[in-house]
Amino acid sequence: MTQAENGGLDRILVMEVVRVTEVAAVAAAKLRGRGNEKGADKAAVDAMRAELGKLSIHGTVVIGEGEMDEAPMLYIGEKLGAGGPEVDIAVDPLEGTTICAKSAPNALAVLAISEKGGLLHAPDMYMDKIAIGPGYPEGVVDLDASPADNLAAMAKVKGVPVSALTACILDRARHSDIIRAVREAGASVQLIPDGDIAGVIWTTDPKETGVDIYLGHGGAPEGVLAAAALRSMGGQMQGRLVPSDDSERVRAAKMGIPDIDRKFMLQDLASTDVIFSASGVTGGSLLDGVTFDGDMIETETIVMRSKTGTMRRVRTRYRGLPESANL
């Protein structure tokens, strides 16, 4: 497989990436509701690693998962693929481990692949984020503005009162001030237990999801993955790393981010042609979860490519368990 003559990733890779997230989702879904977060995460990791090893790429993992909670991971710097063009890989084999363990909505298997150098090499720490969907003038919201000012600016552009807007925020004690500020401004808050990649993507279709803006601190790796999706779907996003101690500041510098206070724009997080794929593990407002019916298995996946601006929903039916999901 070669890169297209005019640059970018080979379009054939789009459907191959779908299979990678499908098998990870199926592997994790086998442990849905079992209360075994690390077991489900490991199953998704092992399945994704095996499937990535079959792709005609020379890939390097630049966004890994699991370091913050010492879970199994596809580690940063890991080389994957059967040979081909050099690409960067960002993974979250099980976005929402707790969600999966409880069989709650919106657990996903997520992957992004870009041209080499196309994804920010973000360390596994927190990132302060703000994201909105398409249709707004550039700069209508800003990470450094207050929630009230951002909501007022969005409402003015949409021609609606602030009370018509909803902010998606992770349900964490650290967000108490943001939640209070949003409500005091007159907007609604949709709290989510986990899964901030889905939370960012929801902003791209507020009529369907009811979410207009995403606010708050979540994982930096998840921020890069969400940015990869927004590159195709449209929208705006800004992020800033939030280190918890000096060791995280040192780590960020070693990964090429010496200015810990830098505000990253969408194009900084995902800068080149990128393919994003997410498969539902548990059902939710973004995707249906994996279903098992006798010897039949069905998955639903959303796959996007930034170069073409295309987005596909893919339903796949397997007879029997995909090989990589049965490790």
Image (tube, grey):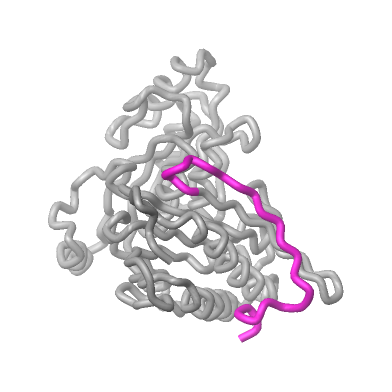
In the rendered structure, the answer to whether residue 119 lies left or right of residue 82 reads left
Q: Residue furthest front?
A: 5
Q: Quadrant of residue 215?
A: top left
The answer to whether one can see residue 36 in this image is: yes
Q: Residue furthest left?
A: 258
Q: Quadrant of residue 145?
A: top left
Query: Closer to the camera, 277 or 162?
Result: 277
Who's the residue at 63% across and 30% down the image?
207
User: Does residue 310 sit above or below 197 in this rendering?
Assistant: above
Query: Residue 94: x and y, percent?
Result: 54, 67
- Give the extent of the magenta segment: 305-327
Image quadrant where one finds the N terminus:
bottom left
Query: Closer to the camera, 134 or 223?
Result: 134
Query: Residue 137: x and y, percent?
Result: 38, 22
In the rendered structure, the answer to whether residue 149 lies left or right of residue 204 reads left
Query: Closer to the camera, 47 or 124?
Result: 47
Q: Residue furthest bottom?
A: 327
Query: Residue 99: x and y, percent?
Result: 61, 63
Image quadrant where one finds the C terminus:
bottom right
Who's the residue at 56% across and 52% down the image?
303
Who's the residue at 59% across and 76% down the image?
40
Q: Is residue 318 magenta?
A: yes
Q: Is residue 244 magenta?
A: no
Query: Residue 319: x and y, percent?
Result: 78, 74
